[in-house]
Image (cartoon, rainbow, N blue to C red):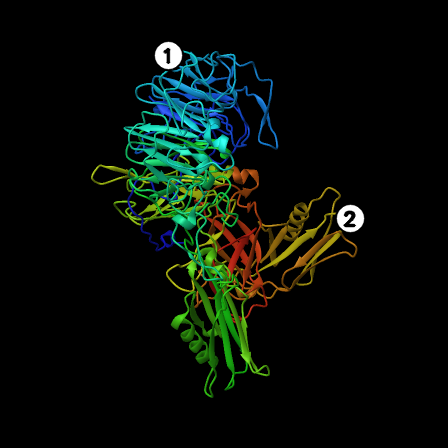
Amino acid sequence: MKWTALLLAASAVCQAQQFSTGQAARLVIGQLPYTAQDPGISEKVLGSIGGVAYAADTLVVADSNGIGGSPINNRVVIYKNVGQFVPDRRAAFPQTSDRCNACVGTAAVVLGQPDFYTGQIVDSNVDGTIDYKDIPATAADSLRRPLGVAYNGRILAVADTDNNRVLIWKSLPTVNKQPADLVVGQTSFTTAKTGTSATTLRGPEAVWVDDNNGLWVADTGNSRVLYYGEVTQNGPSAKFALGQKDLNSDQQLAAFPDYKTTARTLLSPTSVAVSGSRVFVADLGANRVLIWNQIPTQTEQPADLVLGQPDMTSNVNNNSSELCPSNGTDENDEPTYPDRCGRTLEMPRAVISDGTRLYVADAGNDRVLVWNSMPTETAQVADISLGQLDLELNQASDSSEPRRVASTDSFRTPTSLAWDGQNLYVSDTFNRRVVLYTPGDFALPITAVRNAPSPDNYAKGRIVLGGTMEADYEISVKIGDSRVKNSDGTTADPTEYKYKTVKDDTFDTVVDQLVAIINESDPYVVAAPNHSSQAVVITARQAGNDGNNVTLSSSVTPSTAKLTVNASGANLTGGQDPSLIAPYAIVTVLGDNLADETTPVADLTQPLPKELGGVQFFVDGLQAPLIAVSPTRILAQIPVETIDATSAAGVLRVQRKDGSVTVSAAVAIPIIGQNPAVYSDQSLDPQPGFAYHYSSSATGTISVDGTAAGGDVIKITINGRVTEYTVQATDTLVMVRDALVALINATDPEVEAFPSGFYSRLRLRARIPGPEGNNIPYSATAASGSSVIVTAFNSTLCCSNEEGAPVTADNPAVPGETIVVLASGLGIVNPQEARDAMTDGMPYYGPALNDASESVSALAGGKTANVLFAGLRRGSVGIYEVQLELNPDLATDPQMQVTIAQSFQVSNIFTLPVVKTKP
């Protein structure tokens, strides 16, 4: 095979920017790999976390939460020398023997626990309260559900929420369970009283220490933010309160449930941050973020700006009818609105600024919104959404989204944020991790990484004509989209295309007329003629799964017509998502300005380089083997190590010819066990598969099924000669097959036998190559009452051709013949010896007899094609060979549609020329 055929034409455009909507996290702390969701506890594993803080090359994480996540580890962990494990954004990932070089961080100190493997056992009650077990007495070195942390490089503050206090360390702790130096909200380290006064707190959830060592506290239970200044003694009095009229009142509690929302009030704030002259508060209960453009100096000082609401008096979660553009009308012609947009918020839990950009953890929408410059208008729309693919989607809660649960580009309730100058740290509570989002020099498309053999899959269907052509038959073809709805919610009627036959019409002219009529105006499909099959081939205009929503039907009148017009199905089929990637797959990375040169395609029979044309591609920090690079696409192999993940993060690093280095924002790569894709010529439509004739000698197949039971007698008859085998008590089906192979090879003069690589099948092959071996009769039987079942797929050996010769229109396949197609994305193979031989970037030299761990099926011309082998091709990197025995009853079709499938994943549709009798 010419490997240059892998370099398929594709293009994509991406806009250079910093953060980009839909990008993935570059690094993860607390889980291995990103998507593990391990509920353990150690110096490397986090539970359902809360607050995060960064300063002076140190990361602090509150390993507890207040929103029902588990486990609650009741500790604060400190990571020192962060720059040693968080690489510069333009640096290459250090290559180690670790599974995930992007999964980083080993904590150096733990507070609230004696070691990294001890956590307090807690139970969550139905009413949301917590029952603590084995919790030590309240003391300077103990914690009860700490939710917030703050560190300014000098002072460490921890919101010890269920102890109704804030603990302060005057310098960064250096030993485990180090006691705090000061306490705020209590008069001593041994009390945990609640109150509403200048010296008490009620469930504080967040803290901030400003550049002057001034302490700010989000006193969540009292619906206020307190400012203390620098704390120098236990139990200090707050200097002023935001959100309340004085230091001794909770107006919201007193007015409940008729509390009012104004520029002066707060309702359960969960975050406070200071940047320059501004103060930011996440006003959780009012579904908004408040901004003071000058640092407040007095109690009840009103905010200057609100985000998430149209004014200072609104508090509706996702207030889309007031803030979002309409997306249509309902059955009463009233405007409808999306569930959310870039102006709305739902239960925002954190807000910070890096001095230029503003970041909001919009927890209820499972996203982090980014404003690239400081907002200056009420309800200003965000520029970027991290954790979502656009500003209207919530992929964590939308069950129709296939890419969910844990992913490298999504959150499940982000609750806290921190910034280190290059990376945004996000506390991803229900995924039990801290994810680091890094702006890139350029962005990759959201689905940049795709199966290389078929980066765009289009759903297809057919309208097939048959019978007798006569004049005055009216043919109707209806094409629609099941997603298009009327104003009352019902599915919109499809568009009907009609043609009335005339006297001189032939099948060819009618096919051409239908093609012309459909292509003139249909928005959903493109039609093409297949005269040999008397068919109109219908192809969706939209690639991927969307094309499967196209509906198709046909009819002919009158009902007594001798002409038949049949649609292939109620919907087009075959549209699959090529961005779902299997471990070990060959992929193409699409984009713009990805490299400064175009390199030749590497020889897939040789070890692959990991840097090519100045390009490196990292997957979870693992340097991926490269096949070719160009400005618009990269060909690479996904590391087999990703088998344990549901999503990986890809980063392109490019050494430019001028000596500079540019690095992409990370892109999510959804990982799936298998997603088969067959190599075909993407430049033509329909796409002819790269298929090859299997054998220069005629072949046949016998399947051994059922149950191997001792005493069963099997007879294989070849041209009148009988080979008999009696099943032994210890035999398996594979052992029975292998015994038959050995007997045939030892005794039969015309035919040799060998095992198939799939199921317990055996293949027969004429010893003499060429047409002389065709039509040798064979059959298989088992004695009456046997548990074992043997089945001959044909009655004679069939279809010798030049082994390895391409299947072409001049040398087509024939019904019953075995052909070979090449594929990618079939996933892990068996046996273990074969799996162990799957090495990234290296030609496979494991057992020749291996098979994909998920079984493979195939359809050709609408009939089952027997899969005789589906496994890795020896001597090639990442290439799977699939041997298909075509059904002997196929009709002639120069563009026969073929697919292979594993589980629910169906390959791209490719075509083969099949001729019933060769010319």
Q: Is residue 201 left or right of residue 152?
A: right
- Percent coordinates x, y for residue 89 in the rendering: 32, 33
Label 2, label 1: how far apart the Cα atoms are: 90 Å
Q: SS of the residue at dot 2?
A: loop
Q: Which residue is mark 1?
A: 232
Pick whichever, 227 or 102, lies toward us.
Answer: 227
SS at badge 1: loop
- In the image, is residue 459 above or below residue 34? below
Residue 42 at what x, y percent from top left? 51, 23
| 586 relative to 105, above or below | below
> Taking 837 as reference, is 658 left or right?
left
**Screen quadrant of the N terminus:** bottom left
Q: Nearer the viewer, mark 2 or mark 1?
A: 1
In the rendered image, the vertical position of residue 305 relative to residue 703, given as above or below: above
Q: Nearer the viewer, residue 81 or 366?
A: 366
Mark 2 in CB contact with mark 1 (< 8 angstroms) = no
Q: Eyeballing the image, is 256 above or below 681?
A: above
